[in-house]
Image: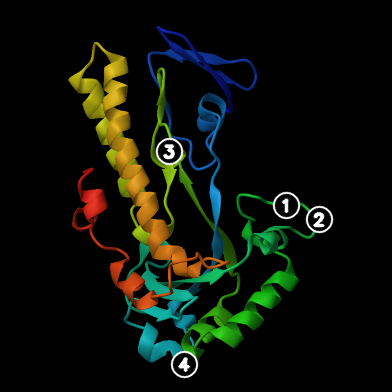
Amino acid sequence: MQLEDVAQDASSVTAKFAGGTTEAGDLLVGADGPHSTVRSRVFGGPQPRYAGYVAWRGVIEEAALPPVAERELRDNYAFFLTPREMVLSYWQPGGDDDSRRGRRRLNWLWHHPLKAEALADLLTDASGRYHAAGIPPPLIRPEVIAAFRAEARALLPPQFGAVTEATPAPFVQPIFDLESPRVVTGRVALLGDAAFVARPHVGAGVSKAALNAAWLAEALAAQPNDIGAALAAYEKRALAFGSAMVARARYLGAYLEDPPRPGLPPEPLKMMRAIGAPLREIPELAGSL
């Protein structure tokens, strides 16, 4: 069902759905993603913020890997870095979850700076419709794909350039992040991407949502007769961890932004070495675990 609104009082909370259906309970958990209706209706925002760069992405069958890319990409988690770009590729199972050599698929991703004013054109389809949250791959205009391929040929090394050329249907993902000042109000709690969205460099979106769920369950179990106190305990942990994760991801991705952020000189190798560090080894995150 499509959630349209939320109402609450001191003793209960009610979800209102399209068509007039309602459901009432003791607690409503908003786990409805980056463009959360719960966050919008109950908390009044905020909305995801564009980071100043996009990720061009694609997948190709292992059998289609171009010869020029064989030596560097066949058995590696590969990266290419410049002061303003980051490209990476890694292997994933092929059809029917087949991970045998020769049956895999290569997943590649190119983080590419792009000013906000240029993003609107990228996300507008041939009919003139603007897809603010991200354009479905089949609706990307042919001239946009052609411009992407030309830029890839000009900027990327031969290995990655050939991979992008061999990809039949590349697509684009705008990079957003989101930091909520509150994740609890009354009997409503936000969880996962509805509360915080970190740029992908931290690589912990699933961990964040799982931790939120565990912390909420623990808080409710510890104080089953005082939902207000339980939610306050949950919010304290979720806010500290979520804010620290968003801040770290912004730090790791700052050199990719367009325009570049003042005071943060490009150090892509340093950033790359920090990407993917275990959460317990990141001081600003470890204290919240």
**Mark 4 in CB contact with mark 1 (< 8 angstroms):** no
In the rendered structure, which amino acid carries the disc numbered 3? Ala
Image height of 140 relative to 69, above or below: above
| Res 199 quadrant in image | bottom left
In the rendered structure, which amino acid carries the disc numbered 4? Val
CA–CA distance between discs 3 and 4?
A: 43 Å
In the rendered structure, which amino acid carries the disc numbered 1? Tyr
Q: Is 171 in front, or is 276?
A: 276
User: Residue drawn 60% across and 87% down?
Assistant: 154
Image height of 143 relative to 210, above or below: below
Q: Is 203 in front, or is 1?
A: 203
Q: Earlier in the sequence, mark 3 or mark 4?
A: 4
CA–CA distance between discs 1 and 3?
A: 25 Å
CA–CA distance between discs 2 and 1?
A: 9 Å
What residue does disc 2 label?
127
Q: Residues within 10 Å of mark 2 (few under 14, many from 20)?
A: few
Q: Earlier in the sequence, mark 4 or mark 2?
A: 4
Secondary structure under tag 1 reads loop
What residue does disc 3 label?
195
* Residue 123 coordinates in the image, percent (x, y): 68, 58
User: Residue drawn 35% across and 43% down?
Assistant: 242
In the drawing, what numbered circle is on residue 48?
none
* Residue 99 coordinates in the image, percent (x, y): 33, 69
User: Residue drawn 55% across and 41% down?
Assistant: 47
